[in-house]
Image (spheres, rainbow, N blue to C red):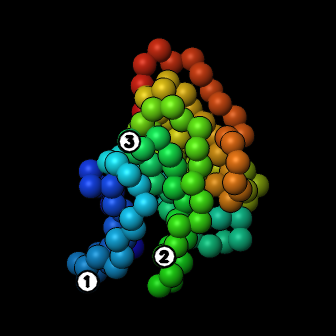
Amino acid sequence: RIASGSSDGTVRVWDPEKAESLVVLRSHTDWVRSLAAFVAADGSTRLASAGNDCVVKIWSIEGDRFEELRTLCGHGRMVMKLASYSIDGAPRLISGAADRAIRIWDPDQEGPALRVLEAHRHWVT
């Protein structure tokens, strides 16, 4: 599977072998600029999406079930980039935004970012 985000605020999950869209995820209110797939602590597949609406959405994309799990808030301007990594099996999500901040999240939890890194003078990508 692959995923794509669009300026229409949607995220699509695709089956590249069949060249078909499996689902259209609609929750963002503006352009989706970045996506990142990761494995949750329980081993399930997740997708994060972010963009001009200043939030990060976490989606379950397991099997044929596609569901929005949570919204992570904290950036004051559009989110430009997402990346993921893991520490001892615990997923972490990084977001960089036009508010010049990098936020590190536990994408399995509601609530504020675990860390906020601020030193850039312009947008973070």
Task: Give the class, few, some or many, for how many residues have Cα within 10 Å of label 2's Cα (few <14, many ≥20).
Answer: some
Q: Distance between the residues labelled 3 and 2?
A: 22 Å
| Mark linked to residue 18 | 1
| Mark linked to residue 66 | 2
Q: Which quadrant would the C terminus be assigned to in this image?
A: top left
Give coordinates of residue 114: x percent, y percent. 72, 40
- Residue found 53% across the figure and 67% down from its top: 68
Identity of the amino acid at label 3?
Asn
Give coordinates of residue 62: x percent, y percent. 53, 78
Residues at circles 1 and 2 in contact by the CB criterion of under 8 Å: no
User: Mark 1 or mark 3, which has the lower sequence index?
Assistant: 1
Residue 77, relative to residue 29: is it above or below?
above
Q: Name the residue under label 3.
A: 52
Q: How far apart are marks 1 and 2 (CA)?
A: 18 Å
Q: Distance between the residues labelled 1 and 3?
A: 31 Å
Identity of the amino acid at label 2?
Phe
Q: Is mark 1 on a helix, strand or loop?
A: loop
Task: Give the class, few, some or many, for how many residues have Cα within 10 Å of label 3's Cα (few <14, many ≥20).
Answer: many
Residue 8, relative to residue 73: is it above or below?
below
Give coordinates of residue 21: x percent, y percent. 29, 76
Residues at circles 3 and 2 in contact by the CB criterion of under 8 Å: no
Asked if one can make out residue 32 in the rendered structure from this viewpoint, the answer is: no
| Mark linked to residue 68 | none
Give left or right: position of 8 versus 123. left
Give coordinates of residue 50: x percent, y percent. 45, 48
Residues at circles 1 and 3 in contact by the CB criterion of under 8 Å: no
